[in-house]
Image: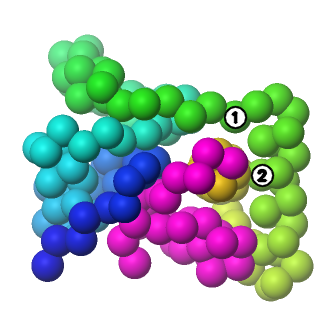
């Protein structure tokens, strides 16, 4: 069953990896459907960086840039978003669940500040959903 993400949706690196690998997961299908239908998707700079870091060749990087180019951009505000991300990390840690990735906290803060749902398979974003109210497109 394919779940359509609620717009507006910020696509996390883990969702792009699912799609690039063609895993057949719900997240893979959801992103495929969104791309094929021309749905507006959102990115933030650290996600672009992570996705492009995974390109094996210059041609793959060019293809990824082509796929990412139509996406809208939501960026952190300095220093507020970074302070927000640190507070999200602390909130999870106080609840006994440490978020492993700094970038996951930053993606979560950007999503919360821009009222975006996150398309992801990352377990740290699931923790941020459960403890901090980050909305997920697919659970």
Q: Is residue 100 above or below residue 83?
A: below
Compared with 52, 136 (above or below) is: below
State the quadrant of the C terminus: bottom left
Position of the N terminus, as image quadrant, is bottom left
Rendering coords of residue 38 (x, y %): 18, 38
**Quarter of image, res 5:** bottom left
Dividing the picture into quadrants, the one containing residue 62 is top left
Residue at 79% x, 62% y is: 88
Tell me which residue sits at (82%, 29%) in the image: 78
Q: Which mark is residue 85?
A: 2
Measured in 3D between alpha carbons, the distance from the residue under mark 1 to the one under mark 2, in whole angstroms, is 10 Å
User: In terms of depth relative to the viewer, which is nearer, 139 or 14?
Assistant: 139
Q: Judge the density around disc 1: few (<14), some (14-19), many (≥20) Cα neighbours within 10 Å.
A: many
Q: Is residue 14 above or below residue 138?
A: above
Can residue 13 be seen here? The reply is: no
Question: Where does residue 130 sit, x and y in percent of width and height?
Answer: 63, 80
Q: Nearer the viewer, residue 53 or 65?
A: 65
- Is 116 included in the stretch rendered in magenta? yes
């Amino acid at each position: 069953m394919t779940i359509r993400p609620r717009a507006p949706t910020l696509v996390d690196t883990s969702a792009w990896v699912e799609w690039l690998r063609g895993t057949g997961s719900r997240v893979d299908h959801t992103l495929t459907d969104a791309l094929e239908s021309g749905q507006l998707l959102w990115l933030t700079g650290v996600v672009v960086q992570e996705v492009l870091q995974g390109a094996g060749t210059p041609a793959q990087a060019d293809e990824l840039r082509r796929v990412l180019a139509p996406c809208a951009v939501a960026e952190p505000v300095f220093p507020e978003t970074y302070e927000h991300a640190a507070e999200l990390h602390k909130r999870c840690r106080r609840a006994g669940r440490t978020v492993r990735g700094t970038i996951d906290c930053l993606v979560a803060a950007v999503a919360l500040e821009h009222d975006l749902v996150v398309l992801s398979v990352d377990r740290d974003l699931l923790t941020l959903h459960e403890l901090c109210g980050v909305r997920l497109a697919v659970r």
